[in-house]
Amino acid sequence: REREQQAFSITPQPAPVARILLRGNPLTPGHEVRPGSLAVLESIAAKFELAQDADDATRRLGLANWIASQQNPLFSRTIANRLWQYHFGQGLVQTPNDLGFNGGKPSHPELLDWMAGSLSDAGFNLKLLHRKIVNSSTYRQNSLPNEQALRVDAANQLLWRHAPTRLSSEMLRDAMLSVAGELNSVGGGQGFQDFRPFLRGGTQFYERIDPISADSHRRTVYRTWARGGTNPLLDVFDCPDPSTLTPKRSATNTPLQSLALLNNSFSMRMTERLSERLQREFVSDPLKSLKRGYELVYCRQPDTSEIDMSQAFIARHGLAAWCRVLLNSNEFLYVR
């Protein structure tokens, strides 16, 4: 940890002077090359207007400003397509990493242009576009199949329904923490670790751990990644390796996922915490406790048959086991 703090406290050093190598020969350097982008892209200025000895952080900032410039229409289209993919499971363009000539064509080009324009006009405020999408009639459609529509458009390219989408691994962990009343919503700062690093024979290794603390119950976006320190619950739900490009996540269905939700130590602990929360909120009214469980996990009230089955199950196996069933259901795992 001390080494990491020292690394972040190092004073930025000027980047070395870059020169054109004549005929690619490092022994015959030519004129200096200043920080900049591709001059072939005529719609946006190629020069960053930075000093030749600008440090690495300043150069990265110059590149970021160039990419997110108002004169770069591809940026807003790409982000808008990613947001649509986030909510619907697939983007309006099926190749989110390539919106050029070699990529896929948008299924709704006018809609993509409108979202990109709205995003740009709002100063790239993502929350505004998120709100527009989730309040749209397209997003609020049910997920029920239609035989005639399936014959015409089985892939749902025309958005005739809201296809069920499974929660991502990070969303699943955060949702379990939230319904159990354990989510630490503090933002920013240093991330938490679910591994313990150690040295053996001069090589760095990572031991998996299951930390139990308020800090480790922060949102999964604050989890510190280590290539050798994987998380069995996140991995089994297709959490990608951050060292690889993953424009669109895979969504597999395997028995290991059910086993992880049933037996993973984190899952077991969250079911216990959810049970304790329900008992704490409704000590003397089991029926209200049951209804509150449905409200927390499914965002709805149970019907009569569900109440009868739940009461019979709780009487036989206990409230904690019932909470375990709730968190293992498809209704909790999928957005419909």
Image: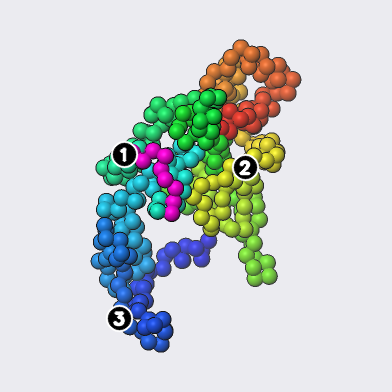
Name the image quarter holding residue 253: top right
Q: CA distance from mark 3 to mark 1?
A: 44 Å
Query: Position of 264 compared to 186: left or right?
Result: right
Mark 2 or 3, nearer chain start:
3
Residue position for label 3 = 31
Name which residue lies at 58% across and 42% down: 251
**On the image, which quarter does residue 53 sit in?**
bottom left
**How far apart are labels 2 and 1 at the CA level?**
33 Å
Task: Give the residue number, with chain letter if any, for mark 1.
Answer: 114
| Mark with earlier residue (3, 1) | 3
The mark that comes first in sequence, 2 or 1, is 1
Q: Could you tell me the amino acid type at mark 3?
A: His
Any magenta on residue 107? yes
User: Magenta span: helix, strand or loop, mainly?
Assistant: loop
Dot 1: few (<14), some (14–19), or many (≥20) neighbours within 10 Å?
few
Q: Please name whichever residue, 227 or 222, is drawn nearer the observer in this view of the structure.
A: 227
Q: Is residue 12 visible?
A: yes
Q: Which region of the structure is painted magenta?
A: 102-110
Which residue is the extreme one toward the front? 152
| Amino acid type shown at disc 1 | Trp
Residue behind mark 2: 252
